[in-house]
Structure formats: C-alpha cells, structure tokens
Image (cartoon, grey):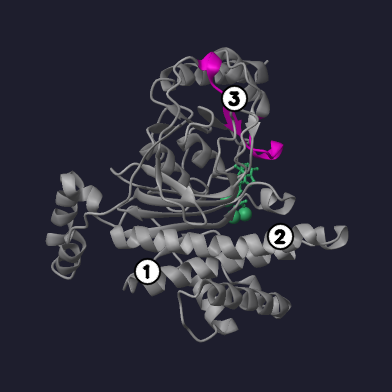
Amino acid sequence: MVSSIVSFSGSTSINSVRLAFSAKTKVVKPLLSLLLRTSPIASMTYEKEFAAAKKAASIAAKLCQKVQTALLQSDVQSKSDRSPVTVADYGSQALVSFVLERELHSESFSVVAEEDSEDLRKDSGREMLERITKLVNETLTCDETYNVNPLSAEDVLKAIDSGKSEGGPHGQHWVLDPIDGTKGFVRGDQYAIALALLDEGKVVLGVLACPNLPLAPIVSHDQHSSQNQVGCLFYAKVGCGTYMQSLDGSSPTKVHVSAIDNPAEASFFESFEAAHSLRDLSGSIAKKLGVQAPPVRIDSQAKYGALSRGDGAIYLRFPHKGYREKIWDHAAGFVVVTEAGGVATDAAGNPLDFSKGKFLDLDTGIIVTNQKLMPLLLKAVRDSLSEAQSASSM
Ligand SMILES: Nc1ncnc2c1ncn2[C@@H]1O[C@H](COP(=O)(O)O)[C@@H](OP(=O)(O)O)[C@H]1O
Ligand SMILES: [Mg+2]
Ligand SMILES: [Mg+2]
Ligand SMILES: [Mg+2]
C-alpha cells in the first residue's frame, strides 16, 4: 500500500552538536545520548549516515546486477561454478565499506559484516581477488561519483575488512549483508544488499536494495499489471517511516504494511529455500489462522521490503533446531518493516535484540506482521509449537 510522495528535507545541526559533545567527557556522552533518544528531534539525526547508506547500497547493487547478468548468460558448466557469487559478495562488501568511509570520514568506523578477506589473502584466492578488484573499479568508474585512482588489490582487501567488528550494545556499528539470498542470486531470483546502522544496540536506520524486486506489488489481485519494472530501494530511519524508490532513482514513496485484520485475507511469506524454514510449522500456523492463499516463497530480506509496502501481511521464519540467526540477515529488514507500521518479534513475542553481537538470540523463530494481526498470529504460533512439541515427544 503506497501513499503520498515525500522527500526528506529540513536538516538540523543536531549531528554537529553530537560531534562536538562526543569529543568531551564520558559523562556528557551518555547524557546527550539519552537526550537525543527521548527528544522529538532524535528522528532528525543520522542524515549523513542515511544518505551514505543509500548511496553505498545502490552502488553495490550495480556490481551485483552486472555479475548476475553475466552468470545467467553463462553456460551450464560455469553456472555450477560458485565463484561468480563469491566475487559479487566480496565486491559488494568492498564497495559498501569504501562508500561509507568516503562519505563519513568517521574516526570509529565499525562494521559487522558477513564476509571477510581471509580466504582471499591465501595464494588460492589471488585470481579471484584480481577479478573482484577489476569489478569494483569498473563499478566505481561507471558510477562517476568518485574520481579516484583505481583501487589496488590491497585496497580492496582492506575495504572488505575495514572496521571489522562483532557489534554489541555500545556505540555505532554498521551491519552489512553484501548479498542476502545468495541462493536466489544464483537462480536469477530475489536477493538484497542489506545495510543497517546500530546505535547503542538499536537499529536506527536501514537500507535494502532489491535489484530484482518488481516495483509493482508481487502479491496482487491485479495479475495483469502492466508495470514490470524491477529494482527497488527501501529505506527507513527511526521515527521517520519507510520509503521506497526505484533503484534507478525515481521519487520516493512512503510505504505502509497491509492494514488487513482478517487473517483469511492475508497471504504469508517464507523462504524460497526449504532448508531455511520449517514448512510444516508455517503451514500449520497459516491453517490455524485461516489463511487461504498459498505461501509466497521468495529469497532474502526482499520479503521485509515487500511486506513493508503491503504485499502480503505475514512473514514466518522458523529455522531448523540449532540454527543461529545472524543480525545482518534481519537488521535492515527489521527497521524497514517496523517503520512501515509492522511488528517483528521472535516466536514468543519478544522484541528482536540486535545488541548481543553478531547473533540474534531468539526463542524459536521470527514472525512479522501488522499490529492488528500480531495477537492472533502469536496465539496460532503458540498453539502450533505446542502441538509440534507434543507430537515429537510421543
Ligand atoms: N539452515 C538455515 N536456516 C535458516 N537460515 C539459513 C540457513 N542457512 C542459511 N541461512 C541464511 O538464510 C539467508 C537467506 O535468507 P532467506 O532464506 O530468507 O532467503 C542466508 O543469507 P545469505 O544468502 O546472505 O548467506 C543465510 O544467512
Ligand atoms: Mg544473508
Ligand atoms: Mg550474504
Ligand atoms: Mg551467506
């Protein structure tokens, strides 16, 4: 559900105030932090970071699109070679770090990212590193924003590891999944470049670039929509709502989650990959809710983006026992969907906690929907889980 066209303006000097204070004593900083979080102007902060994140994800998306196009045109034999995907993962991560550092000149650059350069630094990684370096330089040249000397292989390695961190409850940390939905990327389906910023353990902004997601709703009553343009950029900042624009740069549109309050009319998302989520469980929950529509299975955090604009009303994710969710698989999607009016919790209804390092500590799974459906969904989840538990103990 897409509503009015809005653009961000009305900057304040709150960032400069922050900077000035941040250099001061340890006493002032927490006080200022508290003030900013409780003040109505808190939502006006992070403007520079927000702009940098959008730019970084958009440039990385260009690199990924280029690799995916080449991958899909290649023959069957080279399709089974996974190296193009790896090249895109590393290339995307290097570009995002490069852009963030260039734009922000931050003294304490910290990134919790999925990839690192360890394998690339080995002799066996040399050829791949050359391919990545070439790709990164080609993408930067095409973009024309940065008039820089070509990056060397060493620059690329440094960018991949730049600010490497485990996150945590204090300070600011970027959270990056350079390609989320790797399996979808290989198939030519959905994937996302997912970038979020944590501040004192909370996700304060997030950007999702979804190069293959149609601009038109993917769960639509109008199956004959003439709009088949793909490539969406979703972005959200705490207190400011969620916006979507085309990756080509159309004007932003404010988006909202579905307003459906009758679960029978809702459709639900889950992973395309059967191994990523327990389908028996999501099927049982959907049945209890009376959901009529079949599940919509797509890869990556594109699910959060689609949900944030009201394509479907529920996202169910129940990994197999023992799987630990990583923050980069959810941080950007979380703020995109919650700022659009959605609610995302674990299976017991606890808020998602991004402050514990690179893992999300969860009770069983992740569920996302709108405010009205959440109580019904939680009950269906509770009932289905206890049924599954008693069945397994028999
Ligand atoms: N067995 C498993 N259960 C749940 N998630 C898994 C999984 N194996 C991998 N994943 C995660 O699922 C992500 C993709 O999400 P989705 O299932 O929504 O498409 C992967 O991100 P990457 O593709 O970045 O590695 C990976 O982190
Ligand atoms: Mg991922
Ligand atoms: Mg990934
Ligand atoms: Mg991965």
Label ID, residue 309:
none
- Specify the amino acid type for callout 1: Phe
- Residue at the spot of label 3: 221
Numbered disc 1: secondary structure: loop
* Left or right: residue 277 compared with residue 200: right
Residue closest to the eye, 390 or 28: 28
Pair 3/1: label in front: 3
- Specify the amino acid type for callout 2: Thr
Q: Are discs 3 and 1 less than 8 Å apart at CB?
A: no
Give me the residue at 46% from left, 82% from top.
147
Give me the residue at 21% from left, 54% from top.
10
Disc with the residue nearer the chain's start (2 vs 3): 2
- Residue at the spot of label 1: 109
**Quarter holding residue 319:** top right
- Between the C-alphas of marks 1 and 2, the distance is 32 Å
**Residue 129: x and y, percent?**
66, 77
- Residue at the spot of label 2: 69
- Specify the amino acid type for callout 3: His
Q: Are discs 2 and 3 less than 8 Å apart at CB?
A: no
Numbered disc 2: secondary structure: helix
Residue closest to the eye, 329 or 13: 13
In this rendering, is residue 108 above or below 274? Answer: below
Provide the residue span drawn in magenta.
263-278
